[in-house]
Amino acid sequence: MPLCERAGLFRVLCLFTVFEAGCLLDTGMLFPRESSSREVKELNGLWDFRADRSPDRNLGFEKAWYKSRLSETGPVIEMPVPASYNDITQDASLRDFIGWVWYEREVVVPTRWITDEGTRVVIRVGSAHYNSVMWVNGVKVTEHKGGHLPFEAEIGSVIRKDPTQPCRITIAVNNTLSLDTLPPGTIQHMGDRTKYPDGFFVQNIYFDFFNYAGIHRSVLLYTTPKAYVDDITVVTDFLDNTGLVKYKVSVQGAATATLKVTLIDKDGRCVASSSEPSGVLKVVDVKLWWPYLMHENPGYLYSLEVRPHAYIHVIHGYYLDLSCQK
């Protein structure tokens, strides 16, 4: 295939993959932030790790490694999370490994998270390259395709089945690239047994960078109330000297919700507010965001505060149009 056609195919595959990944996001997945009603527990650090070196890379699923401690299935090593496993050890075979690798960690969940049935407990993975399957205490809670976006699952019902046992989290990650991954690739199986061992294959790639793999961003446990803010959309604009903040708040877990949306200036003063789940906030004599050295007061930011019932979610750093040009 000519180089120009390959480049065109690559661009088309990228567009389809991005579109597919976007369609998979059926919730807002706001980044977890602690508040009076939300707690966050970071699970970064050393996890147990094992690469599935079987010829078809499927032994972990066949033997159900997720049903027991990973160390009971065979030899494990410690692997930092987040990190690319390729560059952590001096094992050349692990650096170039293609297929399923397994991570596991046991964590202690606060008692109040378990006893309070009104608390949602969610596990979130910032990103894992490329396909992922996650279990908690041997129960599959989610799977995800896409190495660059977060995924999460509510696990309250799982950890409440047996409050006496620790929360054992198992994540299997596969870095195999295909024509529907981003970046794309192909697997070529070598069938000549005079040259290659049984099951030997190579990963063909069409890009000029290393295909790093593993859990690349933080793993978090966090809580929310049963009724919670799921997503906040903000679009800013201005007309003459009036700032326009178009917003939409998505609330899950309640048929109706009482909201208080407040726009706060840099000095902590309320400049506009609303009690509707969507609308437009107007700011008279708005202070626009200007780059450094282009204004006497550069980088001016407003904060948007959403307060449903007794709990709060604050979004910092939304700014009105960054220049005077439209």
Image: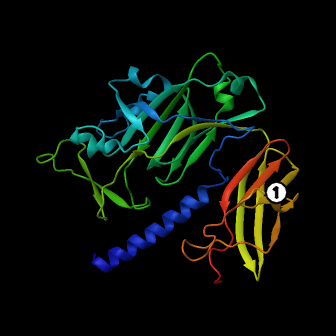
Q: Is residue 64 visible?
A: no
Q: At 50% across and 42% down in the image, what residue appears?
A: 218
Name the residue at the left extreme.
194
Which part of the image, by quadrant, shows the C terminus?
bottom right
Report the colour scheme: rainbow
| Image spot of residue 181 (x, y percent) | 43, 58
Residue behind mark 1:
261
Q: Which one is nearer the viewer's eye here, 201 or 296?
A: 296
Q: Quadrant of residue 10?
A: bottom left
Above or below, comparing residue 230 to residue 180 in the picture: above
Q: Which one is nearer the viewer's eye here, 113 or 325?
A: 325
Q: Is residue 248 left or right of residue 216?
A: right
| Image spot of residue 177 (x, y percent) | 37, 55
Total marks drawn? 1
Q: Quadrant of residue 159?
A: top right
| Image spot of residue 294 (x, y percent) | 57, 77
Name the residue at the front extreme.
296
Q: Count neighbours of disc 1 (C-alpha within 10 A) and say few if under 14, some if 14 to 19, many if 20 or more.
A: many
Q: At 74% across and 58% down in the image, what residue appears?
A: 267
Q: What secondary structure is marked by label 1?
A: strand
Above or below, comparing residue 40 to residue 27 in the picture: above
Amino acid found under the numbered disc labelled 1: Val
Above or below, comparing residue 304 to residue 286 in the picture: above
Q: Is residue 269 left or right of residue 33?
A: right
Q: Is residue 74 left or right of residue 258?
A: left
Q: Is residue 10 visible?
A: yes
Q: At 42% across and 25% down in the image, what residue appears?
A: 70
| Image spot of residue 234 (x, y percent) | 71, 64
Q: Is residue 170 left or right of residue 100?
A: right
Which part of the image, by quadrant, shows the N terminus?
bottom left
